[in-house]
Amino acid sequence: MRQPRPADTEKGELRRQQLLAAAAECFRREGFHGTSIARIREAAGMSAGHIYHYFVSKEAIVKAIAERDENDMAALLNALESDTRGGDLLTRLDRHVRALVKHVTATPRTSLMLELAAEGARNPDVRKLLQQGDQRTARRLFTLFRRENVASKLNDEELRLRIEMIATIVNGLAGRSSMNPGQDRNAMAALVSRSMRMLLDDTGR
């Protein structure tokens, strides 16, 4: 069997991303249940055969969108971990919070993530997918904080609880920004930084 050439792979990934972008826009406008494969096909300018070549169902598209967002968050963590400009982890974290706030409050993303969360409340498979992604991110943060001796005086249970509260703040930004899109993102980022530092205070208070 012929192995795919690099050009084939690149072209296929480009079309896959084009399809995901079209599906995401449909989901934002019409909701998951209001969007059919036919509507996605029309928005993407592809045949039904092309769509099913990349995704076996609409649910598979939803899964891919959730995975793409998790990958975006992982990329932000990668940037934090690879930051060589100096300072301890909390100092480096301050430098990257603005990018995090910009990402989670981006208007196209906020409406899509709210729709995805609503679908998770209805669909146990989507809910499980979202929970697994959330848990992977939390475990990565826990490992990072322990490795760099952040909040070193807190026991594991307390540190995990504080990571959960950080996640609550970050995820809550999406909902608040959709209600008040005119908020000053830089001011929000500064406040998020202060909140994270307070939550990671290792005095145990």
Image: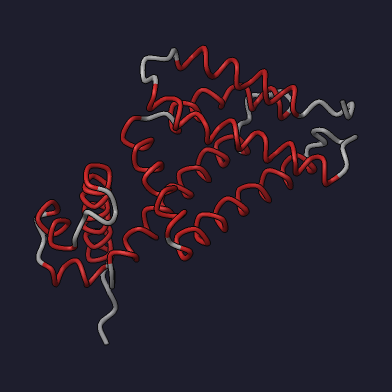
Up-down: is 39 above or below 162?
A: below
Can you name the residue that lies furthest to the bottom here? 1
Total marks shown come to 0
Quarter of the image that includes the C terminus: top right
Measuring from the top left, give residue 160's x and y in whole percent. 75, 44
Q: What residue is at 27 percent from the left and 43 percent from the top?
A: 28
- Write down the quadrant of residue 203 in the picture: top right
Q: What residue is at 23 percent from the left and 44 percent from the top?
A: 25
Up-down: is 122 above or below 196?
A: below
Is residue 114 rendered to the left or right of residue 6?
right
Measuring from the top left, give residue 38's x and y in whole percent. 13, 62
Up-down: is 119 above or below 141?
A: below
Q: What residue is at 49 percent from the left and 58 percent from the top?
A: 127
Quarter of the image that includes the N terminus: bottom left
Measuring from the top left, give residue 200's x and y in whole percent. 77, 29
Measuring from the top left, give residue 56's x and y in whole percent. 28, 73
Is residue 38 rendered to the left or right of residue 62?
left
In front of the other: 87 or 38: 38
Is residue 106 rendered to the left or right of residue 90?
left
